[in-house]
Image (tube, rainbow, N blue to C red):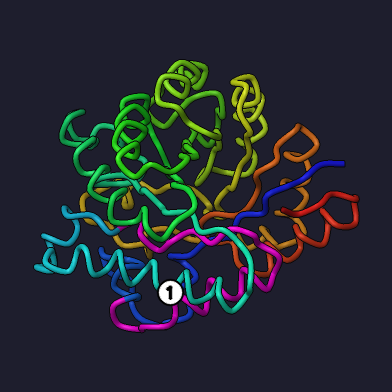
Amino acid sequence: MADITLLDGGMGQELVARSGDAPTPLWATRVMMDHPGLVRAVHADYFAAGATVATTNTYAVHHDRLVKAGLDERFAALHRQALAEAASARAAQGAGRIAGSLGPLVASYRAETHPPHEEAVGKYAEIAMLLAPGVDLFLAETVASLAHARAVLEGAQAGGKPVWLSVTVDDEDGTRLRSGEALSGLGPVLKAGGAAAALANCSAPEAMAAALAVLGGFGLPFGAYANGFRQITKAFLKDSPTVDALSARPEMTPALYADFAMRWVDMGATLVGGCCETTPAHIAEIARRLGAAGHRIV
Protein backbone atom coordinates (compact mmCIF):
# COMPACT_ATOMS: atom_id res chain seq x y z
CA MET A 1 0.00 0.00 0.00
CA ALA A 2 1.17 3.52 -0.71
CA ASP A 3 0.76 7.14 0.30
CA ILE A 4 -1.11 8.86 -2.52
CA THR A 5 -1.51 12.60 -3.08
CA LEU A 6 -4.99 13.19 -4.46
CA LEU A 7 -5.11 16.29 -6.64
CA ASP A 8 -8.32 18.12 -7.38
CA GLY A 9 -10.20 17.86 -10.69
CA GLY A 10 -11.11 20.27 -13.46
CA MET A 11 -11.56 23.91 -12.48
CA GLY A 12 -12.19 25.84 -15.70
CA GLN A 13 -14.89 23.62 -17.15
CA GLU A 14 -16.51 23.25 -13.73
CA LEU A 15 -16.65 27.03 -13.34
CA VAL A 16 -18.18 27.51 -16.79
CA ALA A 17 -20.77 24.83 -16.06
CA ARG A 18 -21.71 26.25 -12.66
CA SER A 19 -21.85 29.86 -13.82
CA GLY A 20 -24.22 29.16 -16.69
CA ASP A 21 -22.43 31.87 -18.68
CA ALA A 22 -21.44 31.49 -22.31
CA PRO A 23 -17.72 30.60 -22.62
CA THR A 24 -15.31 33.41 -23.58
CA PRO A 25 -11.64 33.39 -24.62
CA LEU A 26 -10.82 34.38 -21.01
CA TRP A 27 -12.39 31.08 -19.88
CA ALA A 28 -12.12 30.52 -16.11
CA THR A 29 -10.64 33.97 -15.56
CA ARG A 30 -13.83 35.63 -16.80
CA VAL A 31 -15.95 33.47 -14.53
CA MET A 32 -13.78 34.35 -11.53
CA MET A 33 -14.22 38.04 -12.29
CA ASP A 34 -17.97 37.85 -12.78
CA HIS A 35 -18.77 35.41 -9.96
CA PRO A 36 -16.58 36.09 -6.91
CA GLY A 37 -16.70 33.16 -4.50
CA LEU A 38 -17.45 30.52 -7.12
CA VAL A 39 -13.80 29.45 -7.33
CA ARG A 40 -13.76 29.04 -3.55
CA ALA A 41 -16.88 26.87 -3.76
CA VAL A 42 -15.27 24.57 -6.33
CA HIS A 43 -12.12 24.26 -4.22
CA ALA A 44 -14.28 23.46 -1.19
CA ASP A 45 -16.14 20.74 -3.05
CA TYR A 46 -12.88 19.11 -4.12
CA PHE A 47 -11.56 19.16 -0.57
CA ALA A 48 -14.83 17.62 0.60
CA ALA A 49 -14.45 14.92 -2.06
CA GLY A 50 -11.09 13.91 -0.62
CA ALA A 51 -8.54 15.99 -2.55
CA THR A 52 -5.55 17.14 -0.55
CA VAL A 53 -4.31 19.74 -3.04
CA ALA A 54 -6.14 22.82 -4.35
CA THR A 55 -4.79 24.10 -7.66
CA THR A 56 -5.17 27.86 -8.04
CA ASN A 57 -7.38 29.25 -10.79
CA THR A 58 -4.41 30.96 -12.46
CA TYR A 59 -3.88 28.64 -15.42
CA ALA A 60 -5.12 31.21 -17.94
CA VAL A 61 -4.21 34.45 -16.15
CA HIS A 62 -1.57 35.65 -18.60
CA HIS A 63 -0.75 39.07 -20.03
CA ASP A 64 -1.33 37.98 -23.64
CA ARG A 65 -4.91 36.94 -22.89
CA LEU A 66 -5.75 39.92 -20.69
CA VAL A 67 -4.32 42.44 -23.17
CA LYS A 68 -6.71 41.19 -25.85
CA ALA A 69 -9.62 41.87 -23.49
CA GLY A 70 -8.32 45.27 -22.34
CA LEU A 71 -7.89 43.95 -18.79
CA ASP A 72 -4.14 43.69 -18.35
CA GLU A 73 -4.16 46.14 -15.45
CA ARG A 74 -5.91 43.43 -13.42
CA PHE A 75 -3.11 40.89 -13.88
CA ALA A 76 -1.75 41.01 -10.32
CA ALA A 77 -5.19 41.44 -8.73
CA LEU A 78 -6.52 38.32 -10.47
CA HIS A 79 -3.63 36.25 -9.15
CA ARG A 80 -4.31 37.58 -5.66
CA GLN A 81 -8.01 36.78 -5.98
CA ALA A 82 -7.28 33.22 -7.06
CA LEU A 83 -4.92 32.78 -4.11
CA ALA A 84 -7.48 34.18 -1.69
CA GLU A 85 -10.25 31.86 -2.88
CA ALA A 86 -8.01 28.79 -2.58
CA ALA A 87 -6.77 29.89 0.85
CA SER A 88 -10.31 30.45 2.10
CA ALA A 89 -11.37 26.95 1.04
CA ARG A 90 -8.32 25.42 2.69
CA ALA A 91 -8.93 27.33 5.91
CA ALA A 92 -12.48 25.99 6.05
CA GLN A 93 -11.20 22.46 5.41
CA GLY A 94 -8.48 22.82 8.03
CA ALA A 95 -5.85 21.01 5.97
CA GLY A 96 -4.44 20.65 2.48
CA ARG A 97 -1.84 22.16 0.20
CA ILE A 98 -2.18 24.87 -2.42
CA ALA A 99 -0.50 24.40 -5.81
CA GLY A 100 0.08 27.53 -7.87
CA SER A 101 -0.95 26.76 -11.45
CA LEU A 102 1.48 27.90 -14.15
CA GLY A 103 -0.41 27.39 -17.41
CA PRO A 104 0.90 27.61 -20.97
CA LEU A 105 1.69 31.02 -22.41
CA VAL A 106 -0.39 32.05 -25.44
CA ALA A 107 -2.24 28.76 -26.02
CA SER A 108 -2.72 25.22 -24.73
CA TYR A 109 -1.44 22.22 -26.73
CA ARG A 110 0.22 24.43 -29.37
CA ALA A 111 3.98 24.10 -28.94
CA GLU A 112 4.59 26.43 -31.89
CA THR A 113 3.10 29.39 -30.00
CA HIS A 114 5.52 29.14 -27.06
CA PRO A 115 7.51 32.41 -26.78
CA PRO A 116 11.32 32.66 -27.06
CA HIS A 117 13.11 31.28 -24.02
CA GLU A 118 14.08 34.48 -22.23
CA GLU A 119 10.65 36.02 -22.75
CA ALA A 120 8.93 32.92 -21.41
CA VAL A 121 11.26 32.69 -18.41
CA GLY A 122 10.52 36.31 -17.49
CA LYS A 123 6.77 35.83 -17.71
CA TYR A 124 6.83 32.70 -15.60
CA ALA A 125 9.11 34.34 -13.03
CA GLU A 126 6.64 37.22 -12.67
CA ILE A 127 3.79 34.82 -11.95
CA ALA A 128 5.88 32.68 -9.62
CA MET A 129 6.77 35.70 -7.49
CA LEU A 130 3.11 36.76 -7.33
CA LEU A 131 1.95 33.29 -6.27
CA ALA A 132 4.84 32.28 -3.99
CA PRO A 133 3.55 33.88 -0.75
CA GLY A 134 0.33 31.86 -0.91
CA VAL A 135 1.29 28.45 -2.29
CA ASP A 136 3.10 25.35 -1.11
CA LEU A 137 4.33 24.41 -4.56
CA PHE A 138 4.02 25.29 -8.24
CA LEU A 139 2.24 23.04 -10.71
CA ALA A 140 3.47 23.74 -14.24
CA GLU A 141 0.58 22.41 -16.31
CA THR A 142 -0.03 21.22 -19.86
CA VAL A 143 3.63 21.54 -20.86
CA ALA A 144 3.67 20.74 -24.57
CA SER A 145 7.37 20.76 -25.50
CA LEU A 146 10.88 20.46 -24.09
CA ALA A 147 11.42 24.19 -24.68
CA HIS A 148 8.29 24.92 -22.65
CA ALA A 149 9.57 22.66 -19.85
CA ARG A 150 12.94 24.38 -19.72
CA ALA A 151 11.41 27.85 -19.58
CA VAL A 152 8.79 27.18 -16.92
CA LEU A 153 11.26 25.37 -14.67
CA GLU A 154 13.75 28.22 -14.93
CA GLY A 155 11.12 30.91 -14.43
CA ALA A 156 9.49 29.20 -11.49
CA GLN A 157 12.78 29.22 -9.59
CA ALA A 158 12.07 32.89 -8.85
CA GLY A 159 9.32 31.78 -6.48
CA GLY A 160 11.51 29.54 -4.37
CA LYS A 161 8.97 26.70 -4.07
CA PRO A 162 9.05 23.08 -5.31
CA VAL A 163 7.89 22.64 -8.91
CA TRP A 164 5.81 19.74 -10.16
CA LEU A 165 6.01 19.68 -13.93
CA SER A 166 3.14 18.16 -15.87
CA VAL A 167 3.25 17.50 -19.60
CA THR A 168 0.48 17.05 -22.12
CA VAL A 169 1.06 14.08 -24.41
CA ASP A 170 -0.30 12.92 -27.74
CA ASP A 171 -3.71 11.36 -27.19
CA GLU A 172 -2.81 8.39 -29.37
CA ASP A 173 0.84 8.00 -28.36
CA GLY A 174 1.54 8.81 -24.75
CA THR A 175 5.29 8.45 -25.28
CA ARG A 176 5.31 11.73 -27.22
CA LEU A 177 4.68 15.32 -26.21
CA ARG A 178 2.16 17.41 -28.15
CA SER A 179 5.19 18.88 -29.93
CA GLY A 180 5.98 15.44 -31.33
CA GLU A 181 9.16 15.20 -29.27
CA ALA A 182 9.88 11.97 -27.41
CA LEU A 183 8.82 12.14 -23.78
CA SER A 184 12.05 10.36 -22.88
CA GLY A 185 13.88 13.61 -23.65
CA LEU A 186 12.27 15.22 -20.62
CA GLY A 187 14.50 13.45 -18.11
CA PRO A 188 17.58 15.68 -18.45
CA VAL A 189 15.35 18.78 -18.51
CA LEU A 190 13.71 17.82 -15.23
CA LYS A 191 17.08 17.17 -13.62
CA ALA A 192 18.65 20.41 -14.85
CA GLY A 193 15.60 22.42 -13.81
CA GLY A 194 15.31 20.90 -10.35
CA ALA A 195 11.75 19.55 -10.75
CA ALA A 196 10.31 17.87 -7.67
CA ALA A 197 7.80 15.65 -9.51
CA ALA A 198 6.84 14.64 -13.05
CA LEU A 199 3.26 14.26 -14.23
CA ALA A 200 1.10 14.09 -17.34
CA ASN A 201 -2.17 15.99 -17.68
CA CYS A 202 -4.88 17.17 -20.06
CA SER A 203 -4.56 14.20 -22.36
CA ALA A 204 -6.80 11.20 -22.93
CA PRO A 205 -6.88 8.73 -20.02
CA GLU A 206 -5.97 5.99 -22.49
CA ALA A 207 -2.63 7.72 -23.24
CA MET A 208 -1.48 7.99 -19.64
CA ALA A 209 -0.16 4.47 -19.07
CA ALA A 210 2.39 4.89 -21.84
CA ALA A 211 3.37 8.30 -20.47
CA LEU A 212 3.74 6.97 -16.93
CA ALA A 213 5.95 4.13 -18.14
CA VAL A 214 8.39 6.86 -19.23
CA LEU A 215 7.88 9.32 -16.38
CA GLY A 216 8.38 6.56 -13.83
CA GLY A 217 11.95 6.12 -15.02
CA PHE A 218 13.08 9.63 -14.12
CA GLY A 219 13.63 8.97 -10.41
CA LEU A 220 10.98 11.45 -9.24
CA PRO A 221 7.51 11.09 -7.75
CA PHE A 222 5.17 10.81 -10.73
CA GLY A 223 1.53 10.71 -11.64
CA ALA A 224 -1.28 11.75 -13.95
CA TYR A 225 -4.52 13.69 -14.21
CA ALA A 226 -6.31 13.21 -17.52
CA ASN A 227 -9.09 15.12 -19.24
CA GLY A 228 -12.52 13.94 -20.31
CA PHE A 229 -12.66 15.54 -23.76
CA ARG A 230 -13.77 13.61 -26.82
CA GLN A 231 -10.79 15.08 -28.68
CA ILE A 232 -8.80 18.29 -29.04
CA THR A 233 -10.58 19.76 -32.05
CA LYS A 234 -9.09 21.84 -34.85
CA ALA A 235 -11.43 24.67 -33.87
CA PHE A 236 -9.86 24.80 -30.41
CA LEU A 237 -6.37 25.05 -31.89
CA LYS A 238 -7.15 28.38 -33.54
CA ASP A 239 -6.26 31.74 -31.99
CA SER A 240 -8.41 32.88 -29.02
CA PRO A 241 -10.64 29.80 -28.90
CA THR A 242 -13.54 29.20 -26.54
CA VAL A 243 -14.12 25.92 -24.74
CA ASP A 244 -17.41 25.27 -26.49
CA ALA A 245 -15.20 24.04 -29.35
CA LEU A 246 -14.63 20.99 -27.14
CA SER A 247 -17.09 18.42 -25.83
CA ALA A 248 -17.09 15.96 -22.96
CA ARG A 249 -17.09 12.20 -23.27
CA PRO A 250 -20.42 11.03 -21.85
CA GLU A 251 -19.00 7.61 -21.02
CA MET A 252 -16.26 9.07 -18.79
CA THR A 253 -18.18 8.51 -15.58
CA PRO A 254 -16.55 8.74 -12.13
CA ALA A 255 -16.41 4.94 -12.06
CA LEU A 256 -14.69 4.62 -15.43
CA TYR A 257 -12.26 7.45 -14.70
CA ALA A 258 -11.39 5.88 -11.34
CA ASP A 259 -10.63 2.62 -13.15
CA PHE A 260 -7.94 4.47 -15.07
CA ALA A 261 -6.61 6.24 -11.97
CA MET A 262 -6.25 3.00 -10.05
CA ARG A 263 -4.28 1.51 -12.94
CA TRP A 264 -1.90 4.47 -12.69
CA VAL A 265 -1.50 3.83 -8.98
CA ASP A 266 -0.79 0.18 -9.73
CA MET A 267 2.01 1.41 -12.00
CA GLY A 268 3.58 3.29 -9.09
CA ALA A 269 1.99 6.72 -9.52
CA THR A 270 1.65 8.57 -6.22
CA LEU A 271 0.07 11.76 -7.63
CA VAL A 272 -3.36 11.38 -9.23
CA GLY A 273 -6.34 13.61 -9.91
CA GLY A 274 -8.41 14.98 -12.75
CA CYS A 275 -8.20 17.65 -15.44
CA CYS A 276 -10.81 19.25 -17.72
CA GLU A 277 -14.29 17.65 -17.61
CA THR A 278 -13.62 15.82 -14.36
CA THR A 279 -15.64 16.89 -11.33
CA PRO A 280 -15.77 16.50 -7.55
CA ALA A 281 -17.70 13.27 -8.15
CA HIS A 282 -14.75 11.85 -10.08
CA ILE A 283 -12.33 12.78 -7.28
CA ALA A 284 -14.66 11.34 -4.63
CA GLU A 285 -14.76 8.01 -6.46
CA ILE A 286 -10.96 7.89 -6.70
CA ALA A 287 -10.77 8.65 -2.97
CA ARG A 288 -13.21 5.83 -2.23
CA ARG A 289 -11.25 3.36 -4.37
CA LEU A 290 -7.94 4.36 -2.83
CA GLY A 291 -9.32 3.83 0.65
CA ALA A 292 -10.84 0.48 -0.27
CA ALA A 293 -7.49 -0.65 -1.66
CA GLY A 294 -5.74 0.26 1.58
CA HIS A 295 -3.86 3.29 0.29
CA ARG A 296 -3.44 6.39 2.46
CA ILE A 297 -4.38 9.76 0.95
CA VAL A 298 -1.85 12.40 1.99
Asked where in the image residue 228 lies, by quadrant, the reply is bottom right
For numbered disc 1, what is the local secondary structure?
Answer: helix
Q: Is residue 57 left or right of residue 281?
A: left
Q: Is residue 66 left or right of residue 171?
A: left
- For residue 48: magenta? yes
Asked where in the image residue 145 lies, by quadrant, the reply is top left
Is 62 rendered above or below residue 264? Answer: below
Q: Nearer the viewer, residue 133 or 187?
A: 133
Q: Nearer the viewer, residue 169 or 264?
A: 264
Residue at 61% from the left image edge and 75% from the top image edge: 45
Q: How many marks?
A: 1
Q: Amino acid at mark 1?
A: Glu
Residue at 72% from the left image edge and 39% from the top image edge: 264
Q: The N terminus appears in which quarter of the rendering?
A: top right
- For residue 51: magenta? yes
Point out residue 211 in the picture as x, y percentages from the top left corner. 60, 29
Q: Which residue is mark 1?
A: 85
Q: Is residue 241 left or right of residue 260?
A: left
Point out residue 226 in the picture as x, y percentages from the top left corner. 58, 47
Point out residue 164 in the picture as x, y percentages from the top left corner. 50, 39
- The range drawn in magenta is 33-60
Crowd tier of the residue under label 1, counting other residues whose Cα lies within 10 Å: few below 14, some 14–19, many 20 or above = many
Point out residue 182 in the picture as x, y percentages from the top left corner. 47, 18
Residue at 65% from the left image edge and 62% from the top image edge: 51
Residue at 17% from the left image edge and 69% from the top image edge: 74
Is 212 rendered above or below residue 9? Answer: above
